[in-house]
């Protein structure tokens, strides 16, 4: 048992008694999707995220790393110390082979058939069966083998410019990553390699442009985040000299991803890309009715959005459509790039979300909180034992989750 944690919260009747007469707000600020240093993150350490969350009055925060749950313990402790309710999530990258063959983009704008997919409200501690764990381990190994192959290619480029310099997988992992090494870690390692071995900015830029094959940098040296994004785009993505294509074995089929999420006690959740700056959507998301049918046929009743990517009007139309269909809807910021942005969720250009959108996101977070609470007390949550969804119970679950979160925030007054 974890002292003062979800499973230690009192059962519903007792909680109702203790909450009687306590005034609570209609909604609170929520961020249900952030990455941490255990995959790749704008946060150099988790404590930075908690400091920002307190400053911005974020009441609920969701960890959402790629493939791993290694950050759960630190995340739990940070949430307990800072009185922030934790949502335990995970993210996968899968492949829909039929859509890949047809050239249909899902929620990756550049790679047809590739799908990002999340699990929300997983059991804590994280636990899946041996077979599912083996599948996940194989995927992680395939992903890291690809990274190692990229490092080999990077070193070939580096050796031609300066034979004394080298990047190693172990060095990148020890210095920049808590667990998985990802493309963004490599981009950061290249930038730091230049900064630490060439004293003048002009020399650093010359080194990096040499890696580009002589192409001029548009980012320059003064903006590290922009430069890392550029390095990743120029060298590590398709067409770059250090690009290595993923082995299909590195991807799980979507049905297997959903099964892993179920085994872990979580809620399958589709991350929506929605409109790009030109107003276009991917082929999979372009028609809301078709998207609704596709997700429903997969047994998915939960979606999440990163509103900072989207036009407010488009976001509102889309969210209200799926809210009317009974979907659980969550918002987040990702923080999966080098740029440090606020944790408060806004639409594209920093436009604040209106109250109706904030209420929908609050309800979604409350459903996930109720799911975690019920699962921790060995009850069924939003996802039933056969994988079907309690859509008819969504309102009641949101109401329960709100009480759970509010009690959690005042729990210390009941501690001995």
Image (tube, helix red, strand yellow):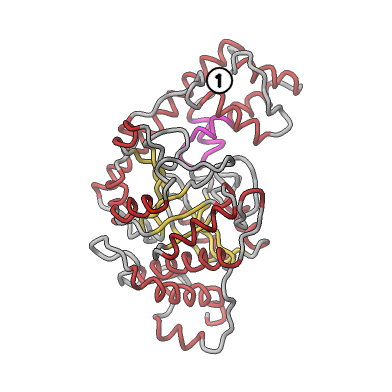
**Mark 1 element type:** loop
In magenta segment, residue 177 = yes
Query: Against 407, is 330 above or below?
Result: above
Q: Is residue 356 left or right of residue 290?
A: right
Residue 296 seen in render: yes
Position of residue 380 relative to residue 76, above or below, is below
Pinpoint residue 210: horizontal percent, then vertical percent: 63, 15
| Residue, disc 1 | 166
Residue name at image x 29 percent, y 52 percent: 298
Residue 2 included in the magenta stretch of the image: no
Identify the image quadrant of residue 197.
top right
**Boundaries of the magenta span:** 170-187
How many C-alpha atoms fall within 10 Å of the one at disc 1: few (<14), some, or many (≥20)? some
Look at 40% across and 86% down and name the residue there: 13
Residue 109, horizontal then vertical, whole percent? 47, 37
To which quarter of the image does residue 248 belong? top left
């Amino acid at each position: 048992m974890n002292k003062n944690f979800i499973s230690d919260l009192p059962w519903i009747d007792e909680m109702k008694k203790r909450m009687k007469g306590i005034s609570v707000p209609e909604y609170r600020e929520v961020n249900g999707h952030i990455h941490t240093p255990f995959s790749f993150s704008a946060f150099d350490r988790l404590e930075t995220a908690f400091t920002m969350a307190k400053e911005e009055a974020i009441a609920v925060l969701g960890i959402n790393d790629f493939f791993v749950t290694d950050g759960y313990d630190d995340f739990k402790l940070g949430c307990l110390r800072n009185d922030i309710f934790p949502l335990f999530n995970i993210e996968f990258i899968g492949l829909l082979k039929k859509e890949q063959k047809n050239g249909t983009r899902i929620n990756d704008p550049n790679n047809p058939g590739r799908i990002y997919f999340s699990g929300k409200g997983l059991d804590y501690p994280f636990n899946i069966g041996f077979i599912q764990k083996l599948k996940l381990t194989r995927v992680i190994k395939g992903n890291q083998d690809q990274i190692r192959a990229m490092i080999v290619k990077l070193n070939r480029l580096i050796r031609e410019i300066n034979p004394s310099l080298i990047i190693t997988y172990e060095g990148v992992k020890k210095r920049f990553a808590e667990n998985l090494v990802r493309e963004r870690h490599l981009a950061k390692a290249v930038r730091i390699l230049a900064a630490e071995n060439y004293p003048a900015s002009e020399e650093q830029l010359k080194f990096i442009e040499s890696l580009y094959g002589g192409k001029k940098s548009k980012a320059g040296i003064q903006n590290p985040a922009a430069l890392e994004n550029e390095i990743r785009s120029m060298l590590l993505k398709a067409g770059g000299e250090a690009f290595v294509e993923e082995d299909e074995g590195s991807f799980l089929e979507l049905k297997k991803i959903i099964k892993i999420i179920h085994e872990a006690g979580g809620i399958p959740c589709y991350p929506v890309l929605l409109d790009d700056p030109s107003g276009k959507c991917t082929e999979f998301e372009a028609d809301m009715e078709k998207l609704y049918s596709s997700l429903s046929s997969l047994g998915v009743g939960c979606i999440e959005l990163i509103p900072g990517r989207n036009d407010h009007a488009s976001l509102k139309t889309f969210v209200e459509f799926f809210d009317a269909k009974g979907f659980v809807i969550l918002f987040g910021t990702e923080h999966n790039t080098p740029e440090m942005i606020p944790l408060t969720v806004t639409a594209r250009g920093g436009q604040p979300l209106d109250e109706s959108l904030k209420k929908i996101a609050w309800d979604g977070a409350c459903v996930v909180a109720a799911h975690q609470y019920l699962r921790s007390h060995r009850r069924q949550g939003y996802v039933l034992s056969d994988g079907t969804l309690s859509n008819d119970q969504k309102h009641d679950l949101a109401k329960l989750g709100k009480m759970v979160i509010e009690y959690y925030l005042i729990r210390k007054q009941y501690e001995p």
